[in-house]
Amino acid sequence: MLSCIQPTGDVHLGNYLGALRNWVAGQHEADVFHGIVDLHALTTTVTPDVIGANTLELSAMLFAIGLDPEVATVFVQSHVPEHAQLGWVMECTVSFGELSRMTQFKEKSSRSETDFVSAGLFTYPALQAADIVLYDANEVPVGDDQRQHVEITRDIAIRFNHRFGDTLVVPEAVTPAAGARVMDLADPTSKMSKSSASTNGCVFLLDPPEVVTRKFKRAVTDSDATVAYDRAEKPGVSNLIDILSAASGMSAESIVSSYRQYGPLKSDTAEAVIAVLAPIQARYEELMADRGELARQLRIGADRARTVASATLERVYSAVGLLPG
Ligand code: TYM
């Protein structure tokens, strides 16, 4: 199993419910690899020194949510040079047309605050494909928004195998039943994202309880005043139901039958989220107090990751038939 996250700002509830929670759940069932993909963050970050600091904080967060460094391999992408090396081979196995159809590229390039849209933003899915196939991943636990990138990885792996013989494992995306697409509380037709216009609709894992309560209290619903699940007609209310379901384990049906008014639905959802976040926040503070230890854990992760990644790269070079060095 492999999945990755970009060190581009604070981790939010969408990341956690859509993906990270599944990483923790999966660590005792599979051989798991989780990358902090700093090279991907380079596609949009141009300020010096930001990515490194974010990377360390994100590693503390990944351990704080429950990834056990003894069990899960948590590593930094740039510490494993095979990602960039295989990324090039993947770029040569994907077409310009396929990359042009990627929703994330269209969104991010149109949202870019400057006129500068990096070529890396365009070829990003090829590097992501390398991240995945380097570890022979069968399963990739992600939120809904990453499904398209896992699909293109499948296409690339199938094409590579067709050209050069069976070499790469063709992966599959795994999304959770509740929380695969957490929406912005202030604008429930857009996904919760760190790049939203305002942070009012985005709940960060490090938000203090009163901030979480305020954000849920102000969550946009509708004027219909009936608690029902309908993503198209009632996106705000459905989002609250999904979040409460993911945070409490209650089914969406039982939530719908237990609530008549939006007020209690909002306050109970906030409480359920605060209960999930409290132990994570306490652990995060402890871990951030020893940055040397975090860096050491990441080095161990990188060593373990390189063992697997270098074997795959060698297999790929040999399948292609590059002259051995
Ligand atoms: P990133 O860093 O944007 O997000 C990390 C994970 O969080 C999920 N996610 C969400 N899930 C539900 N609701 C939301 N509102 C929400 N927002 C984010 C994402 O689906 C993701 O699983 N391209 C990837 C990083 C990546 C990667 C990989 C992922 C690079 N290489 C290889 C998997 C495998 C990204 O930008 O995720």
Image (cartoon, rainbow, N blue to C red):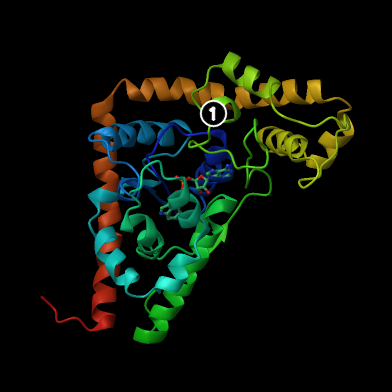
- In the image, taking residue 175 as reference, residue 227 lies left or right, namely right
Q: Is residue 249 above or below residue 283?
A: below
Residue in front for this viewpoint, 181 or 138: 181
Residue in front for this viewpoint, 178 or 47: 47
SS assignment at label 1 = loop
- In the image, taking residue 307 as reference, residue 230 lies left or right, namely right
Q: Is residue 109 above or below residue 163?
A: above
Q: Which residue is mark 1?
A: 198
Residue drawn at 29 percent across, 37 percent down: 51
Residue drawn at 48 percent across, 22 percent down: 281
- In the image, taking residue 167 as reference, residue 204 lies left or right, namely right
Q: Is residue 72 above or below residue 168?
A: above
Q: Position of residue 321 (x, y in %)?
A: 23, 84
Q: Is residue 39 above or below residue 136?
A: above
Does residue 320 show up? Answer: yes
For label 1, the crowd category at 10 Å Cα-Cα, with few meaning under 14, some 14 to 19 and many 20 or more, is: few
Residue in front for this viewpoint, 217 or 131: 217
Quarter of the figure that contains the C terminus: bottom left
Residue drawn at 40 percent across, 20 percent down: 285
- The residue type indicated by label 1 comes to Ser
Q: Quadrant of residue 57?
A: top left
Q: Quadrant of residue 311?
A: bottom left
Q: Position of residue 213 (x, y in %)?
A: 64, 18
Residue situated furthest left in the rendering: 325
Residue drawn at 86 percent across, 28 percent down: 259
Q: Position of residue 144 (x, y in %)?
A: 59, 52
| Disc 1 C-beta below 8 A from ligand 1 | no
Q: Quadrant of residue 264?
A: top right
Does residue 1 show up? Answer: no
